[in-house]
Amino acid sequence: MVVRLVNAVVMSRGFPLLSGVDLEIERGSLNVVVGANGAGKTSLLRLLGGLDSLTSGAGHVAGVDLVEGDLRLLRRRVGWLGHEGSFYADLSVRENLTFAARALLRPVDDVVPALERVGLGHRVDTITKQLSAGQRRRLGLAWLLVRRPEIWLLDEPYASLDDAGRAFFDDLLRDVLQGGATVVVSAHDPLRSKELRPRTVRMAGGRVDNS
Amino acid sequence: MIKFTQRLLGPVTLACLAATFVLGLWVTPEDRTQKNLVRLLYVHPPIAWVALYVSFGTATIASCLYLWKRTRSMNMDRIAHCSMEVSAVFIVLTLITGSIWGRPTWGVWWAWDARLTSTAILGVFALAYLALRRANDDPVVRARRSAVFAILTAINVPIIHFSVVWWKTLHQGASVLTSTGQLNVHGSMLLAMLLGFVGFTLLFFWLLRERYRLEVKRDVASAATLDEALSLRRREGV
Amino acid sequence: MIRVARIVAVKDLRIEVRSRVLLWQVLPFGVIALLLSGLALGPTQAGNSSAGPGLFYLVTLFVTLLMINRSQAIENAPGTRASVATLGLDPAGVFLGKAFALTVELWITGLVLLAGSVLVLHTALIGTVEALPSILVTLTTLALAGTLYGALTQGGDGPATLLPVLTLPAFAPLLIAGERSYSAALHGGALWEWWVIVVVALVAYTAVGILLYGVLEES
């Protein structure tokens, strides 16, 4: 198991974002976390990425203990795509990815091919704040392609994507899964693609609904 | 044994302070130059000692222990928080007793003296520490940030100490016990002063203990609220 | 650590060059504040160079507050914090990189304000040039301290209003030491005490930053 959570609780400012999650995820699987607004989908993804700490309970992700382990180590193993886009708005598309590549000691030569793969080859020198919401999403995906993380955490990745973007995204997921990575996607509704055969994890009230 | 000592803390503190006041006001003689003003010697330096060294020292040590993984616990954060709160009170008292002494001696309530100014700055630090705590609701975030801030504040304490020597302004340097180890206060005056130091130091630990107990009670109450919040949150999913 | 510091510093400076916040917002504020200080002193005092060092440092402190907020705001844009956190950068390197970028920006601002001080407040040019090494070291210390205090205030309630309360008491000894050493360069007097204060603060903030910046990032 790449993820194992036991009664995981995450509190923020006195509010339980997660109220006792029990969850296991197999390596190399595609998991779609669904639920209403405020069900705890984003909080679950943040916990899996080491972006938030456990308040109580236990768990490990990618071999890192969430209570005792080094969360920075975990963060290096995950790729995160948030709703807002994830970049320095005043840097160009290329500069953002070069920064990430240099920080992670990845080859800078991978940057342009990754941008071409996500359809941003013609926007390499555009300042990021000039991109549309959908293009920012694509840039986020390019960032993850450069990073090649073990676990992909994608928070509502279909938002702001047109039909072509969705199809492209499904193709990308297929490649990522074939490469052996684990993917956890949050969405309002179950995934449309039948071909990918994702496992659906339903959340409500800050917990996984196992009923 | 510990409980017995803790129970004695209050009465012993009050006895020491009462003895200081009796000795300071009625038994000790007037000073040749400062006349009755010298009686502030039994109050002002001990309060300043607690404000600048004992309470800030306790807060800094507790903060370091909080940041050290092996000794990390919310108890350390509580001790640091409560020490800083008590410190704020003692700093205000230091400034008030200093002003009362300064008015007849220097002719002004406030002078742009390095030590006065630096003590006031340290007071602002203590208030800033409390403001920082209020700005962060999450207990862990609050504890971490406050601990770092307390350590940063501790950097300022030696600057205050050396400022007296370097800035050479109105405030006198170390005069009771000089840097060469010579003691300049004797007899009943020395006894009153020593009692003052012991009494105010004990007062600090007494206040710290009471404040700490209050904080523990608050945390217990808040934990009960959290359990309720958890159960409400779970019900959202039903 | 140094590798990460270099990457972060280059990124921060590039963002500054691109956004020109320093040029169009911070520097005009500094110049206006310097002019207002002269107006507040009145025509006789404003032309008296003895006020120059103090006013220079006072205005610099206010400008520094703006720049600290700006330096931290870069990291706190929606989504940026989470993605950058997943890079797992060495926090000591991030601290040094951000402090370096802030130092460069403060040096540029300081030079502009010094020129303004010489022109508007009639501070002696030769003395100002002699004071330059101590000014640059003091500004470096301000940048190091500012980077730490900036990280302390991010994410809580009212960070922009909390920052001055936290930083100004810490900046006060630097203000005094900086002003005294600048005055000593202008009018003569002992210098070494002020150097000791600034250098001790510089070493202390560097050490605390390297050791504890990670704690602030984690929170």
Image: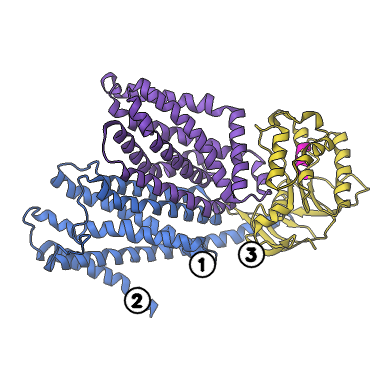
Chain colours: A yellow, B blue, C purple
Q: Which residue is mark 3?
A: A68
Q: Position of residue A38 (x, y in %)?
A: 70, 48
Q: How would you classify the magenta stretch by its main secondary structure?
A: helix
Q: Is residue C155 visible?
A: no
Q: Position of residue B8 (x, y in %)?
A: 31, 74
Query: Given this view, does label 2 or label 1 mark the residue nearer the observer?
Result: 1
Q: Dot 2, how many residues are within 10 Å of its Cα: few (below 14), some (14-19), or many (20+)? A: few
- From the viewer's perspective, is residue B167 above or below residue A151? above
- From the viewer's perspective, is residue A134 above or below residue B226? above
Counting residues from the start of the chain, the first of labels 2 and 1 encountered is 2
Q: What SS does tag 2 mark? A: helix
- Which quadrant holds the C terminus of chain B? bottom right
- As drawn, the label of residue C137 is none
Q: Are marks 2 and 1 on the same chain?
A: yes
Q: Position of residue A25 (x, y in %)?
A: 80, 59
In this rendered view, identify the residue nearer to me: A148 or A30: A148
- The amino acid type of the residue labelled 1 equals Thr
Q: Which residue is mark 2?
A: B5
Taking the magenta stretch, the answer to whether it contains residue A140 is yes
Please indicate whether residue A198 sits to the left or right of residue B178 in the image. right
